[in-house]
Every structure is written in C-alpha cells, then in structure tokens.
Image (cartoon, rainbow, N blue to C red):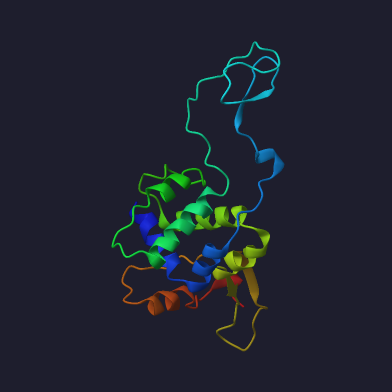
C-alpha cells in the first residue's frame, strides 16, 4: 500500500485541500444509485436483504451474496476525513489506513486496490471520486487545488515569426521525468524545454 500512503501524505501537505476535506459534506446520491436490496428473479421486485423470500410473489428466494457489497456512497470521503483528522490531532505515531484502502476498492483502479498500483492513477481516481461524492459547494476547491494546463507555442528559430499559443486540456497532474534529476526544478525545466522542429513542420 506504499502508493496509497505516499499519495495521502502528499495531499495532506496541501492545506487548501486538507481544509476542504475536513469541511466537505457528502452529496446526496442520485436516485438510481439508492439501492440496498436484492431483486426477485420472478417478479423483479426489490427486497431487503433481511427477508429470505419476495414480499409480493412469495416465490423468489434471496440469492447468496457471491461478491463483496458495493462501497456505500460517500465512504471514500468519510474515510479520508477520518484519516486527515487523525493526522491532524492524534498523538499516536502510526495509523492503519486499511479502512481507507477498503473504501477505495471500487474507484476504478486498473488492478485490485491491495496490489501495488500506480500512484498517479490512484491520485486521479481518488480526486474523481471525491468530486463525485462531495457537495457541489465544495467542488471548486477540489477541482482547483490540483488543476494544470499545458500551453504550447511554435516559434521560428530563424526569425520572429510564431504561431498562436495552443491551450491543452485541463488535467489533475503533470508527469515529470525523475531519472537523472536532482531536484523538482530540474524536472519542471525539462518538461517545458523547447524542442526544435525541422522539415515541413517548422515555423
């Protein structure tokens, strides 16, 4: 779970994000997501898991639960709030993030959450889930705390001619090269380093 621990520690260091997490309210679930029972195979009525037979036709029987129940809506935000509050106020030196990890098991990761995953992918999926679970009034902070856009411009190396600035799409993260880089500044400088275009595509 090192990718999860590292990501949460980095997010915790961003005060605007940390304050938003602790204050955020969970948004109401869309009507189609509100479901906590089983559907009768005979009449299709939804029944509570507490009953063994369909309450209308009496024929349908409760199926066996073969998979883990879906993570309740808002659980990712709630567990992240719990984690942040612990990091802010607890005197203990360690914290077990297993509940947060379990809440994140269906955020859309390529591999199971308990396996080694890509930290960038986890970061992206986590923010997407927080945006979906949070009350609309908190969305600007979640969306604005991590939002970048790359601007590109083609300039002539032979004269003063240049193309208009091209704006890329908004993204939540930048992918930086780390091999051979001694500092973050060097990685950022390499990211925006000019590239010489030759041939028919040159300005």
Say left or right for 123 vs 158.
Answer: left
Name the residue located 69 percent from the left edge and 45 percent from the top edge: 30
Name the residue located 59 percent from the left edge and 74 percent from the top edge: 152
Q: Nearer the viewer, residue 138 or 128?
A: 138
Locate residue 127, reporting x and y percent. 54, 58
Locate residue 108, reporting x and y percent. 51, 46
Which residue sits furthest left? 93
Which residue sits furthest top? 59
Residue 55 is drawn in which quadrant?
top right
Residue 172 seen in the figure: no
Q: Is residue 117 above or below residue 92?
A: above
Name the residue located 52 percent from the left edge and 48 percent from the top edge: 75
Q: Nearer the viewer, residue 141 or 182?
A: 141
Name the residue located 58 percent from the left edge and 21 percent from the top edge: 51
Q: Is residue 163 above or below residue 106?
A: below
Locate residue 70, reporting x and y percent. 53, 37
Residue 44 seen in the figure: yes
Residue 91 is drawn in which quadrant?
bottom left
Say left or right for 57 vs 101.
Answer: right
Q: Nearer the viewer, residue 45 or 11?
A: 45
Locate residue 36, reporting x and y percent. 60, 33
The quarter of the image holding the C terminus is: bottom right
Q: Nearer the viewer, residue 189 or 112?
A: 112
């Amino acid at each position: 779970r090192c990718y999860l621990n590292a990501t949460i520690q980095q997010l915790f260091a961003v005060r605007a994000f940390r304050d938003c997490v602790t204050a955020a309210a969970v948004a109401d679930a869309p009507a189609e997501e509100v479901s906590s029972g089983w559907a009768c195979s005979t009449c299709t009525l939804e029944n509570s898991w507490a009953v063994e037979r369909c309450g209308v036709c009496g024929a349908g029987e409760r199926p066996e639960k073969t998979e883990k129940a879906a993570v309740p809506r808002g659980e990712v935000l709630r567990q992240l709030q719990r984690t942040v509050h612990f990091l802010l106020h607890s005197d203990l030196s360690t914290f077990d993030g297993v509940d947060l990890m379990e809440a994140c098991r269906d955020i859309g990761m390529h591999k199971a959450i308990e396996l080694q995953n890509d930290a960038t992918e986890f970061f992206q999926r986590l923010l997407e889930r927080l945006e979906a679970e949070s009350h609309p009034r908190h969305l600007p902070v979640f969306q604005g705390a991590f939002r970048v856009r790359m601007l590109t411009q083609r300039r002539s190396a032979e004269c003063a001619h240049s193309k208009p600035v091209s704006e890329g799409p908004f993204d939540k993260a930048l992918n930086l090269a780390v091999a051979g880089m001694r500092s973050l500044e060097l990685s950022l400088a390499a990211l925006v380093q000019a590239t010489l275009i030759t041939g028919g595509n040159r300005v």
